[in-house]
Amino acid sequence: MTSLRYDSLLLQSWRINLSPSGLALVVRFLTKRFIWEYDPTLESTYRHQATIDDEVVTMEILDTAGQEDTIQREGHMRWGEGFVLVYDITDRGSFEEVLPLKNILDEIKKPKNVTLILVGNKADLDHSRQVSTEEGEKLATELACAFYECSACTGEGNITEIFYELCREVRRRRMVQGKTRRRSSTTHVKQAINKMLTKISS
């Protein structure tokens, strides 16, 4: 078994009305419980170790307070390797914040591609739904990412799988980047050797 560390998986939960869906999601993932009262303005960082596909993974999960200034927000984005964009299915405003947030992420993380997952929380409140499942799926297709609906309150939906799948996506991206770097390094070595041979023969 190999040990693989993802030291900066970042949970982003910037939402309209600062609804505490993101933190509740993290707590449900880590403790299998739901907490009813907490301060949604507090920034929290959690560390969690799990075995995913026979590999030991260490995650650092940052739940942002939702009230950061621009500098703090950009710092959080640079820190993260993976992002969970959480919206509230009973709050259309929170859903409409997702795409602008993704655009900011793209700008800050360029030229790298952003690794993210889209999550619609509060699936237990279907009677108050303002965002359809189809709308979530369509946006996820546009963002080229996985999509889940779940409930941090009841545990509905596979919340653990959300974080595990994000780890898998980060791992895939790292492998692709590693292959690209190796090809680039090989090309540079070949170019240097060709230059040396050209000088010798001239």
Image (cartoon, rainbow, N blue to C red):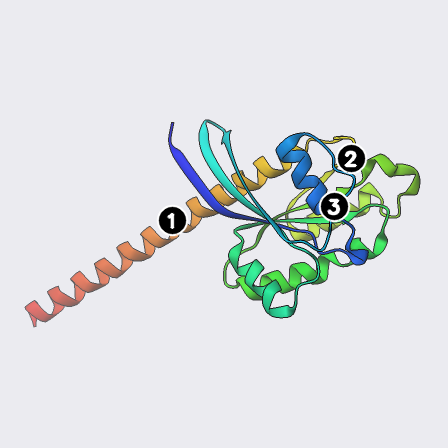
29 or 109, which lies in front? Answer: 29
Say which residue label 1 marks: 178
134 or 48, which lies in front? Answer: 48
- The reply to whether residue 137 is in sight is no
Alpha carbons under labels 3 and 1: distance apart: 41 Å
Indicate whether 68 appears above or below 89.
Answer: below
- Position in image of residue 19 (x %, y %): 78, 51
Between marks 3 and 1 in the image, the one whose residue lies nearer the viewer: 3
At 39% from the left and 34% from the top, the residue drawn is 3
Label placed on residue 154: none
* Amino acid bearing label 1: Gly
- Position in image of residue 177 (x %, y %): 42, 51
Q: Quadrant of the C terminus?
A: bottom left
12 or 165, which lies in front? Answer: 12
Quarter occupied by residue 18:
bottom right
- Name the outermost residue toward the right: 127
* Amino acid bearing label 2: Cys
- The reply to whether residue 121 is in sight is yes
